[in-house]
């Protein structure tokens, strides 16, 4: 056993929740951002601003035409797998082999591909690391083992994992449609908390394919955390903190939350309020990419995702036009309500003596 532990340590194979549930999951979200999400944004910009280079086909593969944006989106599987491998400290031959593994697991996982990529890429990466540089023909053995394991597991696991992820996501979306008030609270609070924790709310939403009303509630929860923390900590962090948290990430407050968990009360309560307002009053839906549901105001990706969904609905004929109510709902849920409610709730928390000056100062 001691020899095995020494081997794992030498290979930098750390079997832990942090390595797989935080590092790998967070990296997967970055891979999604740099492929699927950026591709969607490029397509939206090209369509809305009538930019020929961004709307014309630049490549044709098997009779399928690709724009610049769709080429980026098509690489989401490889991008996720390589990002995961980077987070797991894979040596070069393993890292590059994960390109094939990511493509296979994402393709075979169907709509639930991101979850399949997460599981398959982790196993393939760790096994690849285990055999790396153990033979004199490493340049052959390492890619063969990594790709062989990855593609084999993709054929075995990916379809089931993809179906399971989509089933869970479908149940959440079905429940939200059925009970928009209670599920609006649950989804908004859960995804908002995930956004601030050192895990990836974007990856969770992508893995579950969370769209529709449930996606709208997720956007509300993320915005409540990001805009809420940015505004209510303005006295400590000024404009730099407003920008870094408001369009960056509320995860910056994690150290302060550990020191005083009560600073989290106001954003969580705010998300519990804005979630059902989004689902019941404004019927805010995320019909863009699922990963956008978990991004909130980070680079305004959540808002771009909602807008993209509106355009998709109009193109499909399920929506006639974007109404003033649509815009009002998006701005109120994303910016105005969190900016008003969160500091107001925090004011009462401060009066109870639970939060004091300096508790939310960013280092």
Image (spheres, rainbow, N blue to C red):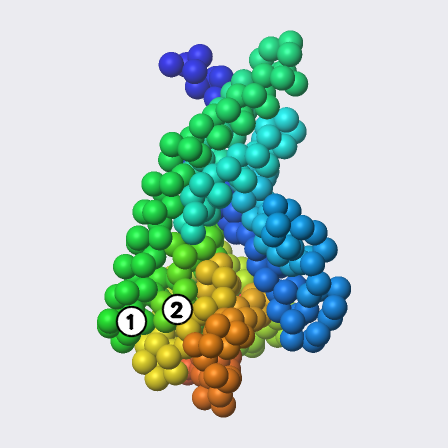
- Relative vertical location of residue 26 with respect to residue 307 in this rendering, above or below: above
Of callouts 1 and 2, the N-terminal one? 1
Residue 275 at x, y percent in the picture: 36, 74
Which mark is drawn over residue 177?
A: 1
Q: Taking 330 as reference, is 12 above or below it?
A: above
Residue 210, given in percent of the width and then of the height, sits at 40, 61
Q: Is residue 167 left or right of residue 264?
A: left
Quadrant position of the C terminus in the picture: bottom right
Identity of the residue furthest to the front in this view: 63
Left or right placement of residue 266 versus residue 140 in this view? left
Contact, mark 1 vs mark 2 (Cβ under 8 Å)? yes
Residue in the picture at 45% in, 41% down:
108
Could you tell me which residue is drawn at 45 percent across and 80 percent down? 319
How many circles with numbers are drawn on the protein?
A: 2
Mark drawn on residue 7: none
Q: Residues within 10 Å of mark 1 (few under 14, many from 20)?
A: some
Q: Secondary structure at mark 1?
A: helix
Residue 212: assigned label = 2
Residue 70 or 335: which is nearer the viewer?
70
Query: In the figure, residue 211 lies in which quadrant?
Result: bottom left
At x 49% / y 30%, what residue is drawn?
150
């Amino acid at each position: 056993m001691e020899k095995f532990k020494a081997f794992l340590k030498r290979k930098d194979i750390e079997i832990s929740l942090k390595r797989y549930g935080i590092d790998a999951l967070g990296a997967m979200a970055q891979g999604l951002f740099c492929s699927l999400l950026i591709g969607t944004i490029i397509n939206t910009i090209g369509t809305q601003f009538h930019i020929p280079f961004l709307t014309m086909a630049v490549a044709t593969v098997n009779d399928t035409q690709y724009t610049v944006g769709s080429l980026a989106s098509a690489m989401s599987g490889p991008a996720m797998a390589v990002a995961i491998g980077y987070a797991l400290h894979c040596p070069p031959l393993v890292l590059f082999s994960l390109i094939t593994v990511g493509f296979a697991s994402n393709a075979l996982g169907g709509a639930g591909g991101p979850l399949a990529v997460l599981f398959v890429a982790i196993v393939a990466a760790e096994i690849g690391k285990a055999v790396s540089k153990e033979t004199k023909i490493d340049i052959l053995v390492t890619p063969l083992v990594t790709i062989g394991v990855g593609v084999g597991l993709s054929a075995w696991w990916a379809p089931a994992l993809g179906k399971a992820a989509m089933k869970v996501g479908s149940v959440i979306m079905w429940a939200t449609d059925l009970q928009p008030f209670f599920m609006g609270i649950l989804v908004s609070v859960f995804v908002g908390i995930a956004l601030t924790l050192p895990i990836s709310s974007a990856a969770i939403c992508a893995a579950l394919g969370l769209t529709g009303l449930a996606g709208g509630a997720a956007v509300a929860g993320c915005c409540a955390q990001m805009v809420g923390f940015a505004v209510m900590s303005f006295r400590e962090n000024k404009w730099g903190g407003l920008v870094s948290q408001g369009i960056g990430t509320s995860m910056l407050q994690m150290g302060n939350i550990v020191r005083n968990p009560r600073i989290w009360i106001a954003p969580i309560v705010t998300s519990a309020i804005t979630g059902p307002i989004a689902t019941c009053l404004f019927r805010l839906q995320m019909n863009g990419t699922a990963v956008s549901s978990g991004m909130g105001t980070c680079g305004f990706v959540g808002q771009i995702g909602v807008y993209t969904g509106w355009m998709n609905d109009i193109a499909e004929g399920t929506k006639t036009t974007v109404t003033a109510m649509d815009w009002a709902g998006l701005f109120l849920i994303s910016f105005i309500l969190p900016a008003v409610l969160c500091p107001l709730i925090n004011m009462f928390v401060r009066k109870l003596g639970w939060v004091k000056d300096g508790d939310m100062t960013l280092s």
